Image (spheres, rainbow, N blue to C red):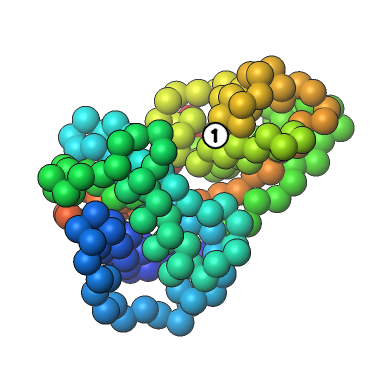
Amino acid sequence: MYSDDDGKLAVRIARAAIDSAVKGEEMPDMDIPKHFHEKSGAFVTLNTHPAHELRGCIGYPTPHFPLMISILKGAEGATQDPRFPPLREDELDSIVVEVSLLTPPELISVSSPEDYLKKVVIGRDGLVVERGMNRGLLLPQVPVEWGWDVEEFLAHTCNKAGLPPSAWLDPSTKFYSFTGEIFTETEPRGGVTRKVLDGS
């Protein structure tokens, strides 16, 4: 759905928003194509370099905002991810910026919870879990990076929502799947590449 040039631009927008937020400066003017003003979900992830440890990840899974705004809000939010201390200016050159451009989440229809094991594909799907007031999300790259199988992916998504890992076996638990096109800096402020997920 998105070209490599789109991905490079998405990461450049996120990097500029991160720099501006941390330094307290205005965003620079950028030439934004028309389709970046169409509504789309997006997540911005910050990882340390070269250790590749999570430093922040914030985003919007559903297409409530134009893509440009989803990226800006995700980038600014990632610098203040409540799981971590606020990103400092002296860290800006030791993080890599990753942007996930998402399809809208769709309910996974199953006859019984065990059917999730056949319907969810590692390396393709991200998951949103929902039960009552509890809701959690994991991006498609997460189970690949951790080497999880489908059952572990379901359990960790439940855990992210504050539910027991076995909550995926409860018929009242709902799962939604989505896919993402992922683009990342190869090094801090370096080139941008499309991340291809291998779920094998």
Q: Position of residue 40 (x, y in %)?
A: 55, 64
In the picture, measured across the screen, residue 63 lies left or right of residue 190, that is right
Q: Nearer the viewer, residue 13 or 122?
A: 13
- The answer to which image quadrant residue 41 occupies is bottom right
Q: Position of residue 113 (x, y in %)?
A: 78, 26
40 vs 36: above or below: above
Q: Position of residue 91 (x, y in %)?
A: 17, 43
Q: Position of residue 147 (x, y in %)?
A: 45, 24
- The answer to which image quadrant residue 127 occupies is top right
| x 27%, y 79%: residue | 29
| x 30%, y 36%: residue | 85
Q: Which residue is mark 1?
A: 122
Q: Is residue 109 visible?
A: yes
What residue type is disc 1 on? Ile
Label 1 element class: loop
In the picture, measured across the screen, residue 77 lies left or right of residue 51, that is right
| x 40%, y 51%: residue | 77
Instruction: State the residue lying farthest toward the front.
Output: 24
